[in-house]
Amino acid sequence: MKMFKNAIFYTCDFPTIKFDSLRDALTPNEFKPCKPSQGCSLGWVAPYADKPLCLVERIGTDYIDLAANNTTLTHVYLICMLTEEKQVPASAINKALDERINEIEEKEQREITPKERDELQYDVRQELLKKAFSKYCRTYVILDVLRGVITVDASTYERAEDLINLLRDSLGTLEAKYPQVARKPSKELSSWLFTKVKPVFSSFYDVEGILTGDVELISADPKEDKSKIRFTNSELTEEELDPHFEVGRQVSKLSFVIGNDSTFFIQGLIHITADAFRFTKLRLELGEDNAVNDNDSDDLELTREANALLTANALYKLYIWFVHAFGGLDDAHKQEQQKPPNDITADGSSFTNPAYEEARASLRAEAQQLNS
């Protein structure tokens, strides 16, 4: 398992999920390739290519506490969604449509109606889909059932929402929500830079953080002023930042390094949108206590399991570090289902791609047929 390059976190109250029941729940929504006239298909695939029949991988192993005479279950799982999209450029559709319209109008000596145009456009798109090349994308996710945290390796909220929706369809119910913290992340990050005050948070995990030289600043009212100011690979000084903070600009993107010498370091970028936050360009370096050398063991399975466990733990510490740094989870977060930030897209449209909705509907119909 490779380190996640991105991370979007969700919190949820998982139903009681065991390994076998999770595998059985995912199976009806297993990935199926696009049909000739289908524009998009998505479903579950095996996380590891050399184990194509295993849709679920357990991260960590169960252990037995002999003193307490009980077994502790890890309930941390790795799963993967595969998306196939056929790319048909709008210019190709318009060109073929114009040719079809001109042919009909010359032959029949009349103008086609708007309804006929829509029908022709649909027919043209279906024909071009049969010839289109497919683009594939794998999206990995870690399900930490006991802690109630989902970590999605996605750089956009739209992709993460597609996966959560598919997971919800598979499980039947899933109340996943973005972490709502007590203090606004954008104001908190701006305060760290402006006042040079380190964040106050729990030291339970013995993790320290450093803010590094990549910063993006936006207006306090992005709808009125959409300009952005970026500092890249620079040593940030008061002379550079103070004038922007004084006029109300806030941090929308900031590079960081967190960790400690003995266990791990994670570096990356945190992005702030509305009250939500996500991470990109993540890079994990294990400390000397956790270093895993692929040449130390001939057992690929053990080496891979160790890497997966260390990665999952590091990502959880990344999540909990920033949650605590932002004041912890808001009390209202436990009572109200959070919607995706609606200002990710300029026009305020929904995250969900209509083509994905169609693909999910097709999966649900096939699952119902299998169960009937």
Image: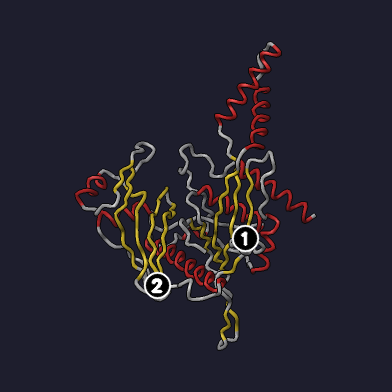
Mark on residue 143?
Answer: none
Above or below, 189 relative to 324? above
**SS under mark 1:** loop
Q: Observer-nearest residue: 29 or 14?
A: 29
**Image position, residue 293 (x, y; %):** 45, 72
Q: Which image quadrant for residue 77?
A: bottom right
**Image position, residue 176 (x, y; %):** 55, 57
**Image position, residue 93 (x, y; %):** 59, 29
Residue for badge 1? 46
Q: Observer-nearest residue: 53 or 245?
A: 53
Sequence-earlier tag: 1 or 2: 1
Mark 1 burial class by Cα count in 10 Å: few <14, some 14-19, many 20+:
many
- Residue occupying the point 52% across, 47% down: 158
- Describe residue 284's horizontal placement relative to residue 71 as left or right: left
Above or below, 196 relative to 134? below
- Describe residue 36's horizontal placement relative to residue 66 as left or right: right
- Residue occupying the point 60% across, 52% down: 82
- Residue occupying the point 39% across, 63% down: 266
**Image position, residue 280 (x, y; %):** 43, 54
**SS under mark 2:** loop
Instruction: Determine the residue located farthest toward the right in the rendered image.
Output: 372
CA–CA distance in space, label 1 to label 2: 29 Å
Q: Nearer the viewer, mark 1 or mark 2?
A: 1
Q: Which image quadrant for residue 270?
A: bottom left
Q: Are marks 1 and 2 in contact (CB under 8 Å)?
A: no
Mark on residue 263?
Answer: 2
Identified by mark 1, the residue type is Ala
Identified by mark 2, the residue type is Thr
